[in-house]
Amino acid sequence: MDNKKIERISKALSDVSRIAILQEFKKKKDCLYCAEVNDLLDLTQPSVSHHLKLLVDAELLLPEKEGRNLKYVLNQQVLDEYIASLNELKD
Amino acid sequence: MDNKKIERISKALSDVSRIAILQEFKKKKDCLYCAEVNDLLDLTQPSVSHHLKLLVDAELLLPEKEGRNLKYVLNQQVLDEYIASLNELKD
DNA sequence: TTTAAATATTCAAATATTTCAATATATTAA
DNA sequence: TTAATATATTGAAATATTTGAATATTTAAA
């Protein structure tokens, strides 16, 4: 993973709202709906949409359209690659 | 590790200059001098000082005064704790 | 086809980050 | 003690991020 990608993922992870979104996947198993994220955070819908966009742009979340709803799944592969890059920092 | 700490470390990691600093530890073994970081980056000394401060504030780097020089070591424990927090995101 | 619901976009304001010039501080050398 | 070296701080400009109000788009329901 190149440094620009590490930077982008780190930026995606550097906000407590976005961290909370990612943590919600542990509770909700496999997938999370956009509407659930709106309920989870104490922010307006456009703000939540913005945060989700950053997570999708970083490829930490994979969006799946389901009618007029939007479902997200955690991209474990990208998360693993990011973690592997961090592990490489340790001699 | 609480979410504010995860946020702080993520922020510290979300800049290519700071990522480059951390990666330099692999080459330079165990420690890195402040002056070496100034040479490494194409930035002025105050900018480098600022980046190093963010890494120290996030506790990713531990500073050690050596006369009028400053030596940094990588805090592997904090890095491990951060990685462990990220691993927890995966179900 | 009109209406309602879910999500995205645009714009602007508030705040944060990055960078550098200038300067300050701390420590060693002369 | 004075001068030089290493690092930190301050202040300001440029840029980026966060947030919400207003509005647009997309899709399903009536």
Image: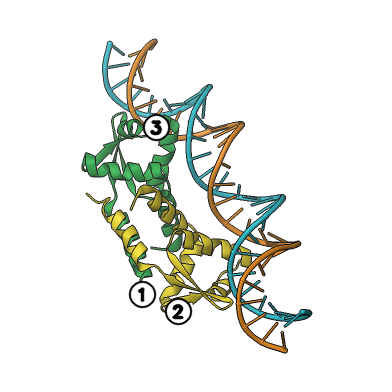
Chain colours: A green, B yellow, C orange, D cyan
Residue D24 location, x and y as percent? 49, 26
What secondary structure is found at the residue carrying circle 2?
helix
Q: Quadrant of the C terminus of chain A?
A: bottom left
Name the residue carrying label 1: A91
Is residue B29 toward the left or the right of residue A79 in the image?
right
Residue A18 location, x and y as percent? 38, 43
The chain containing the residue under callout 1 comes to A
Residue C6 location, x and y as percent? 33, 28
Q: Is residue A72 above or below residue B87?
A: above
* Residue in view at x 43 percent, y 72 percent: B73
Which numbered tag is attached to residue B28? Answer: 2
Q: Are marks 2 and 3 on the same chain?
A: no
Residue in the foreground of this view, choosing between C19 and D6: D6
Graded by Cα atoms within 10 Å as few (under 14), some (14 to 19) or many (20 or more), the crowding at tag 2 reads: few
Q: Is residue A39 above or below residue B70?
A: above
What secondary structure is found at the residue carrying circle 3?
loop
Graded by Cα atoms within 10 Å as few (under 14), some (14 to 19) or many (20 or more), the crowding at tag 1 reads: few
* Mark 1 vs mark 3, CA separation in Å: 41 Å
Residue type marked 1: Asp
Which numbered tag is attached to residue A42? Answer: 3
Residue type marked 2: Lys
* Mark 2 vs mark 3, CA separation in Å: 45 Å
